[in-house]
Image (tube, rainbow, N blue to C red):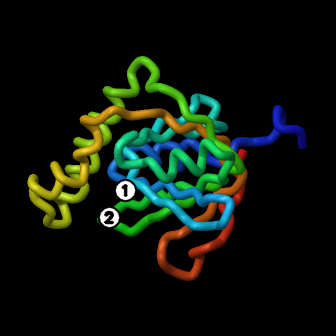
Amino acid sequence: MTTETRLPILDETRAQFLSHHVSILVASCNAACMPSVVRAYGCRVAPDRRAITVFLSVAQSTAVLRDLGAGGAIAVVFSRPTTHETLQLKGARASIAPLADGDRELTLAYGCSFGEEVASVGFGEPFQRAIMSGTGEEAVAVTFTPAAAFEQTPGPSAGQPLAVKS
């Protein structure tokens, strides 16, 4: 199949999962395969579900942004703390751009959503403020096309590629 006719890797349910009540970690590596990892502050899924955008604090993401800017691959893990349901998406390349209209509001909504999630497992407001501190900083949008997606929820299916659903 060509890129234009290929089905998106994510179905609507999984696309919704990426945006609410999940911890989002973004990883890349440099040419020497030294990894870099940072927390993201929200996610936007394209209407056709073919592109994913995560929001990163510039100040906290120096290494990841350097690696992605040099053409490094991207891996993003989305995990819900209350259930440990986890998905991993991988892409060959990512583009880095300023936030678009509405993105700042998405980061703030994500912060509230993630705060609710961690509160339900006993983490109070000081922890929530600390973990989401990057939402107030200068941020960028990192967009990629997932080339692979994996079930990473602990259990017998962990590590299995997601089946593409029509």
Mark 1 against mark 2, which lies toward the viewer? 1
Picture layout, residue 87 above or below residue 155: above
Q: Secondary structure at mark 2?
A: loop
Q: Crowding near pointer 2: few (<14 within 10 Å), some, many (20+)?
A: some
- Pick the residue in front: 73 or 48: 73
* Horizontal and vertical percent position of residue 143: 58, 37
- Pick the residue in front: 59 or 96: 59
Q: Residue at x 59, y 51 (%)?
A: 67
The type of residue carrying mark 2 is Pro
Say whether disc 1 or disc 2 marks the residue closer to the N-terminus.
1
* Horizontal and vertical percent position of residue 2: 88, 38
Q: Residue at x 41, y 42 (%)?
A: 56
- Is mark 1 in CB contact (under 8 Å) with mark 2? yes
Name, please, the residue furthest toward the front.
32
- Pick the residue in front: 65 or 51: 65
Picture layout, residue 53 above or below residue 79: above
Which residue is identified by label 2? 81
Q: Is residue 149 left or right of residue 36?
A: right
Which residue is identified by label 1? 23
Q: Residue at x 53, y 36 (%)?
A: 45
Residue 1 visible in image = yes
